[in-house]
Image (spheres, rainbow, N blue to C red):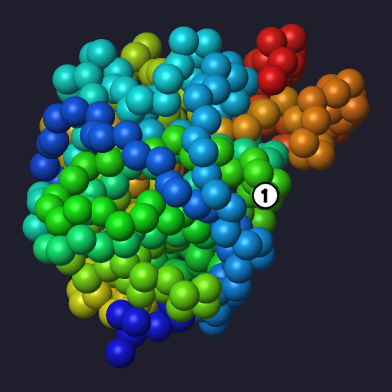
């Protein structure tokens, strides 16, 4: 019975992305803000074994969103400027402000893989997420996000995907009924998560129970909310990109929904999230954003002159690590962008 097991992934053979048979629907509003009651750092290996790397840490919330250099990856469509609050936003030229996409209130999609094709490589100290949750009775709600260090979603290959460090979020017992939520979570209390060159994407799991080693996947209506990361928005949204946003998702994703069994089948569960004309952001992706100090180039947790020197050395060497704007090239625009944010500080 895989719905009540240590999450295990199965390797799928390389193949073309399966065309989606489940076009998403638009839903209005940013959702209801909710904070976890406790958080922990966790790890999942390639066999699906889950290990807690820290004890549970009581969570009190935080409100500092005003870090203009803070966006490491954004599939959330939020504003990263000095006036930022963390509330999900939408570009004004797309669909009405605050709107999101999902597969309807009855959809059961609690286990997924998505990629992060470009992101700023340093330590993520906070994350933003949005999801739907609809148990028939009061149920404890857990969310897990594991950085992925394997797989190639473009080829529907999930080999090793989802294996890596991650975060466990316990939101306590929630009431029955369908809700649409978002959360802005400080994960710096356990040192954050390292976004480095080994990261290829992430796995998200919505869970109804966790005993420290075993994740019980939620088996009732729930799903991540959908939007598009900012590089995708550049193609469709033009100048309406949220201030400070950065990052890109690919077209392909895995959803454990055919059937829901704790594993991914490349033949039936690898989907394209480019739903064609009529969607402002193409392709859509699950709503996740990582924030931190993007000018902390050496990832030691402190923005100092050493970071500036390290960036300059990488830039002069043409090292792709100096591709600060994520366009795939090291150019003067990367240098200018880094200097501008370095002067703002964290």
Mark 1 sits on what residue? 190
Quarter of the image with the C terminus is top right
**Vertical order, 195 against 5 (above or below):** above
Residue 337 image-quadrant placement:
top right
- Horizontally, residue 207 falls left or right of residue 322, namely left
Numbered disc 1: secondary structure: helix
Quarter of the image with the N terminus is bottom left
- Residue 296 position, x and y percent, is 75, 30
- Residue 178 position, x and y percent, is 14, 50
Comparing 139 with 147, the one in front is: 139
- Residue 91 position, x and y percent, is 30, 18
Q: Is residue 319 visible?
A: no
Q: Residue at x 12, y 53 (%)?
A: 177
Q: Residue at x 19, y 53 (%)?
A: 175
Comparing 78 with 40, the one in front is: 40
- Horizontally, residue 241 falls left or right of residue 101, namely right
């Amino acid at each position: 019975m895989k719905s009540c097991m240590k999450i295990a992934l199965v390797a799928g053979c390389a193949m073309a992305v399966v065309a989606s048979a489940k076009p998403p629907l638009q839903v209005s509003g940013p959702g209801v803000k909710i904070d976890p009651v406790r958080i922990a750092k966790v790890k999942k290996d390639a066999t699906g074994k889950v290990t807690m790397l820290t004890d549970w840490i009581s969570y009190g919330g935080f409100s500092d969103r005003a870090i203009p250099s803070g966006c490491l990856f954004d599939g959330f469509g939020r504003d990263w400027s000095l006036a930022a609050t963390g509330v999900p936003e939408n570009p004004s030229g797309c669909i009405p402000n605050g709107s999101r996409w999902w597969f309807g209130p009855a959809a059961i999609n609690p286990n997924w893989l998505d990629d992060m094709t470009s992101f700023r490589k340093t330590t993520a100290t906070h994350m933003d997420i949005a999801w739907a949750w609809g148990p028939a009775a009061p149920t404890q709600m857990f969310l897990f996000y594991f950085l992925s260090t394997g797989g190639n979603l473009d080829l529907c290959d999930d080999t090793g995907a989802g294996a890596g460090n991650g975060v466990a979020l316990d939101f306590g017992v929630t009431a029955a009924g369908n809700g649409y939520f978002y959360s802005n979570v400080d994960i710096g209390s356990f040192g954050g998560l390292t976004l480095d060159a080994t990261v290829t994407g992430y796995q998200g799991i919505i869970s109804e129970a966790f005993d420290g080693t075993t994740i019980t996947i939620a088996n009732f209506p729930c799903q991540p909310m959908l939007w598009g990361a900012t590089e995708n928005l550049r193609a469709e949204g033009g100048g309406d990109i949220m201030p400070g946003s950065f990052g890109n998702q690919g077209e392909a994703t895995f959803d454990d929904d055919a059937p829901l069994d704790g594993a991914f089948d490349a033949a039936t569960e690898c989907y394209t999230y480019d739903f064609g004309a009529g969607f402002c952001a193409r392709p859509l992706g699950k709503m996740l954003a990582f924030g931190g100090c993007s000018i902390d180039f050496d990832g030691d947790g402190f923005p100092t002159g050493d970071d500036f020197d390290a960036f300059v050395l990488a830039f002069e060497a043409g090292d792709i690590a100096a591709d600060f704007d994520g366009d795939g090239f090291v150019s003067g625009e990367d240098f200018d962008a880094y200097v501008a944010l370095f002067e703002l500080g964290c």
